[in-house]
Amino acid sequence: MARISKYAALTAWLQEHGTDTVHFTFDDLNNIITLPNSAYVDRPAWANCTTIHVTSFQKGWLDAGYVVSAINLQERWVEFTKRGITVVTNKQTAAANRMQHRTVPKSFDEELLLTVPHNLVDLETDNFLMVCLNKHNSDIVEACIAVDPAYQSKGKAIMEQYFNAGDYSAKAYYDIINRIATENSTRTSKETMTLLAEYCADPANKFLERIAAGDEYLVDALLQHLVDNNSRRDKSLASKMCRYLNEWLYGGCAYTINDSVVRAIMPYYLAYYKIDKKLWFGKNFEELSYIEFYTIFSALRDKVGVLNNHELDHLIWYAYKNDNIRSEVAKALATVL
């Protein structure tokens, strides 16, 4: 017999009583279910997750066809809006679900744009119907991220709590790194985070001095430390650590995130903008060191000319992470342009 979720009562209530928009105080919700402790302090707990990482709590509203459209942890209320979203297990199924809610495409152009997320349909496209790397599109993406419950960070507050108290211990760094990993859906091991925290806390490594200077070789130094200690080279997490601490502590923009979505899509833009092929063509982006990746990324950023590191990696990542069709087309175009 299938196990009944302790949050199934919320699903049933929304299916039976829910209107297009439903506003609950946390006390209201506790009359239907018992909220998990994370719901009071952790915005990502309220994320509208549609991957295999969805929690049973999130399935409580998603299975009823609702999404969290507004949340206020301080005032303790949440708003659900009916969107017809169903929890799915992978990108292909997610794309198929979105297509069910679209009209049948009447042209190749409409078919190519079939899996564009609803909140990104206003993004400008180039002559191949890929997302333009311009300020207009960047502003749309940044606005989406700013209100997306899945990307509301508490990492900076945790960092400030430790550092303002003069605590730069390995434990302090571990908690900061763990928060960055959690909020960015970065799956990694405790061993990896412990090793990274120990490196940061060791005065001999001058970690914060290098962060302040925007040292581009620091990410690879972190990765080498992992290799030397027989741990996996977590390229994504190491780059995220440097990126966020550089921004939070110094207001900097010296790093980009070595993300798998960006690595997959970037060759299209390198070809489209006619970046010197000697720099990138034929290279396995999954095997590049950070400094190699950043050199190529910087060439694209400089060619685009209107976006900084953070804006460019945000735009590529957010525009394509749930757009299955164009992601595949972009990879194919990179080989023929």
Image: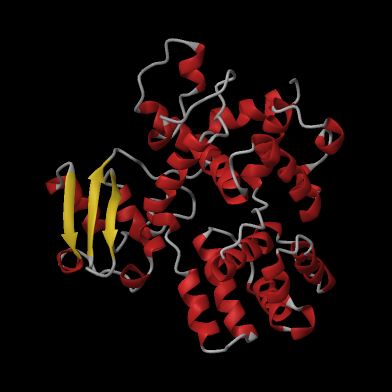
Colour theme: secondary structure
Q: Residue furthest left?
A: 17
Q: Residue furthest bottom?
A: 166
Is residue 150 among what the camera can see?
A: yes
Above or below for 24 versus 207: above
Q: Is residue 159 left or right of residue 288?
A: left
Q: Is residue 316 left or right of residue 267?
A: left
Is residue 322 among what the camera can see?
A: no
Of 115 and 139, nearer the camera is 139
Residue at (74% x, 50% y) in the render: 294
Q: Position of residue 303 (x, y in %)?
A: 69, 35
Above or below for 8 versus 299: below
Examine the image and state in which quarter residue 47 appears.
bottom left
Above or below for 260 versus 167: above
Q: Is residue 237 left or right of residue 117?
A: right
Residue at (76% x, 66% y) in the render: 218
Residue at (68% x, 37% y) in the render: 266
Q: Position of residue 160 (x, y in %)?
A: 50, 78
Image quadrant where one finds the N terminus: bottom left
Image quadrant where one finds the C terminus: top right
Examine the image and state in which quarter residue 273 appears.
top right
Of 77 and 254, nearer the camera is 254
Q: Is residue 267 left or right of residue 46?
A: right
Residue at (58% x, 34% y) in the render: 133
Q: Position of residue 103 (x, y in %)?
A: 35, 19
